Amino acid sequence: MTTLYRPELLFADGRFTAQAGLLVDDKGRCQSVTASDAASDTVIDLPGKALLPGFVNVHSHTFQRLIRGKSESRAVAGKDFWSWRGTMYHAAANLDPQQVYDVARMAFLEMALAGTTTVGEFHYLHTSPDGRPYDDPNLLSKQVIAAAQSVGIRIVLLRCAYLRSGYQLQRDPGQTRFFETAPEFLANMDALVGEYPGGSAEVCIGVAPHSIRAVPFDDLRQIVTRARDKTLPLHMHMAEQVAENEACMREYGATPVALIGKAGLLGPDWTAVHAIHIAAEETRMLADAGATICSCPTTERNLGDGILAADQAMQAGVRVAFGSDSQAQIDPLEDARELDYHLRLTHQQRAILDQIGGQNLAARLFDCATVNGARSLAVPTGTLTTGSFADFFTVDLRDISIAGHSADDLLPLIVFGMNRTAIRDVAVNGRLIVRDGGHALHDEIVSRYEEVHAKVWRDAAGAGR
């Protein structure tokens, strides 16, 4: 059984083509980009729409959707990243397993409506609020996976190791739900992988040592070895904050990227999340290893982290992908355009990332949001090529934000000017999860989220926060 999707324009091989269709097999894989009148068992017409590969969100913490707008005052959350964490810890401490599911569904719904078809969930809520493990130590991981399955988005659950608060620091009570010992993490990770062996079209597993401050180096080496034995992607926060680098220098005499690079742990399966405060030598280490940087511009600007030197990274050959991180915004195109816009403000020039490696700016940023993210998560998606997952979204060509286009300038219009409201349909594995701008579970998901949101912040008010 095959399905033929017939849009007005189809984006493949770097260009938009008219009178083309996407032929999808019964396993949800792309069979071919073909003529729009090709034979098929089922035909789905998408008139007035362009069809493009779905976005890949490499770095997400779904529970932080709860703190959007709650930490935008110094009186509430202080001036910097480290004080902001108090607001985040409150949300983390006040969710039961059902509420973890409800909040994750809200974040995943918003991603789907923004054209995201695959998400890497960097998950570090493991225990009950008092730090005791659940009967199933992977309960909360499975709740987040179930939330993704409910919405219909593909998930790579990046199970996070969080072993300490930092070098020579007492355990922070706000992190109680994050902690496991290294043996516990390895056992629980093995169990989770065992329940989703080899991944599937909908659920895959990866490994995420949280950071060098949260995972001592000897434990990190052991975790990396286990992950590579199982051929799992490795993701780690690196050099997000200057203070993180300084703490690593005090403990190891090197910054995180330099420490891990010189130890030979970097590789093509490694994604350095943020990597803002790195030197030229460290950029070369990432490039030589074939590693990816996951930039999270909407979160990084919200937290005042700093600006990724994406021009230097790309010139060195480092791939860059995107993540929504703290969910300050969920809009992959906003992350894409801000990657270049932040550099424009720094350099006081325009189109900084244009023509690096001979690639035009819009195509480069779109690849960051699709192809590079798929590589980071080790998922065959991000393009509409034979054998890849049939993940795509459509845009309304008459939407006010992109109307008046040609096939040549449509991609720049989408990347730099399109509103999210232009996104009309979203498919994962060839199955439409959003149709004409709507999701079947939209009202239920929003209603359940509103109940959780009201309770968490009502409790916060009662506690004097």
Image (cartoon, helix red, strand yellow):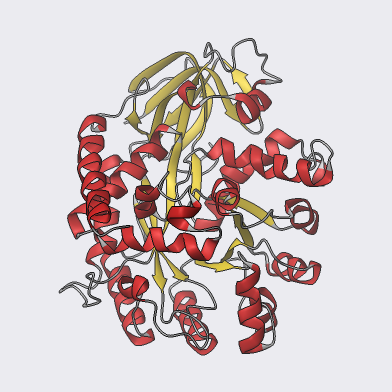
Q: How many labels does the image show?
A: 0
Residue 115 seen in this snapshot? yes
Q: Which residue is drawn at 55% across and 78% down?
A: 212
In-image side of 218 versus 246 (left or right): left
In-image side of 445 versus 229 (left or right): left
Nearer to us in this view, 448 or 404:
448
In-image side of 212 versus 4 (left or right): right
Where residue 64 appears, x then y in whole percent?
Answer: 39, 53
Where residue 311 appears, x then y in whole percent?
Answer: 78, 51
Nearer to us in this view, 154 or 445:
445
Q: Quadrant of the C terminus?
A: bottom left
Q: Residue at x 35, y 87 (%)?
A: 183
Q: Quadrant of the N terminus?
A: top left
| Rendered view: 96 above or below 218 | above
Residue 260 seen in this snapshot? no
> Quadrant of residue 140 in the image?
bottom left
Where residue 28 appears, x then y in whole percent?
Answer: 37, 39
| Rendered view: 309 above or below 107 | below
In-image side of 162 versus 213 (left or right): left
Where residue 369 appears, x then y in whole percent?
Answer: 57, 43
Residue that sits furthest to the left in the current view? 135
